[in-house]
Image (cartoon, rainbow, N blue to C red):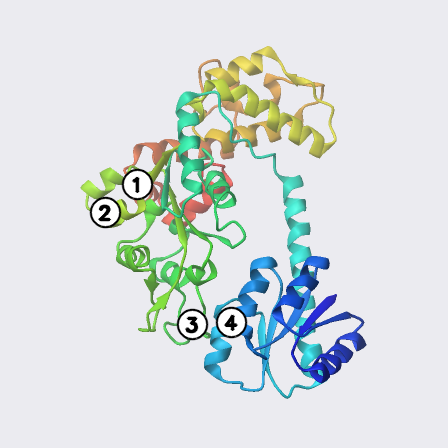
Amino acid sequence: MRVLIIDDEPGIRRTTGLAVETMGHEAVGAANGARALKALEEARCDACFLDVNLGAENGLEVLAKLLATAPTLPVVMVTAYANISTAVEAMRRGAFDFIPKPFTPDQIRAVLARVEQGRALASRVHLLEAQLAEEAPALDLASAEPAAQRALQIAFKAAETSATVLVLGPSGTGKSVLAREIHRRSAQRDARFVTVNCPSLSRELLESELFGHTKGAFTGAVADTTGKVALADGGTLFLDEIGELPAAIQPKLLRLLQEREYERVGDGQPRRANVRVIAATNRNLAEEVKAGRFREDLYYRLNVIEVTLPGLRDRPGDLARFAESYLAFFATRLGKRLMGFEPAVRSAFAAYAWPGNLRELRNVIERAVILSPGETIGLADLPAQFHAPGDSTAAVGAPVTLEVLETEHIRRIVASARNLDEAARILGIDPATLYRKRQKLGMT
């Protein structure tokens, strides 16, 4: 690593540089902020030691200039006047760490080891992102349909602001994909995108996951946890299926949106978090408000910018393009040479209702690519619901698998029930199980 040492005392620069060089790194010295910024302009630095008392300069002000030039630079603050308030202020302004004078070579080595660990983790994240890109089809957020075009235009315009966005639409229409794209286009793009699946946990566990808890707050709370709100501080908090948020948690979320404050479970101390909230649901929240299941004030706080994604059946102009994209992706991934779809398949796709939307289309085509013995996808490669013209469902007693029957039954119940809780009661399972089944079957 190239390590920048900023101190107005030549002796300190020499001894710190020696410790840095014994670790195999390059040391670059600077006596003041101007020379430090010039060093940054000449070549990239991987870490920096900065004296708080830098002659006539204030080290905290130099810190701000350094981070404005190199936002990801790990800056370690050094001072002979170590105190908690200075440390807190330095960390608040973006310092990586804080060590007091006089320091030992071992302290220098320890902090640089942590910087190296962070670099290794960042490299690992980049590698995993690259691998993930190979595992998923390219993001397609274009559309030939006016309704979808309007929705995307609103979303991308909202992305440039910090406004709360509410994404509506049936399951499988790509609400979470759009939420990530809004984050990617926002000023928070370099911070975290944190997802909370609202119906996946009990009320108590969901509250803890959102806001964190203190040790002993409830049975099993063996240590303090920060929660996902704190994790998303400075970035984006994505609340998936917000319509399932328990009533007891709704006022706490409202407080976060209104005042940027929250409290951990078991702790009355208010904490602050600067998060951009994006929420998504397949429910009609206005109807939920009328029915008394969702707070009206929370609804209006969430609904600053509303984006409604139409279902795949309402995007016939996009269907063929999506299908071709998935086909190309899975054929390449599985090492198959497939030229396209037979005309009967295209007709079946056009006639099908696509209750699972884009997620269902992806699953259908992945299955077809796996099963296809030839160079084109035929009807025989598709699931049973495509075999009977005009019939997109599987009947009891038909020669189909139990998975096909279960999928269709769950779809019908969810479509007819007022909400997922009611659907779970009809199916005889708890809401969390229904949520997992919908994920597995490509219905979320």
Reading the chain from its start, which is encountered first: label 3 or label 4?
4
**Tags 3 and 1 in contact by the CB under 8 Å rule?**
no
**Tags 2 and 3 in contact by the CB under 8 Å rule?**
no
Residue under circle 2?
A: 293
Q: Is residue 107 visible?
A: yes
Residue under circle 4?
A: 91
Front of the two marks 2 and 1 = 2
Residue under circle 3?
A: 221
In the image, what residue type sits under mark 2?
Arg
- Residue 20 location in percent, x, y? 75, 75
Is the N terminus in the top left, top right, bottom left or bottom right quadrant? Answer: bottom right
How far apart are the alpha carbons under marks 2 and 1?
10 Å
**The image quarter in which residue 134 lies:** top right
In the image, what residue type sits under mark 4?
Met
Reading the chain from its start, which is encountered first: label 4 or label 1?
4
Above-or-below relation of 428 to 68: above
For the residue labelled by badge 2, is the local secondary structure a helix, a strand or a loop?
loop
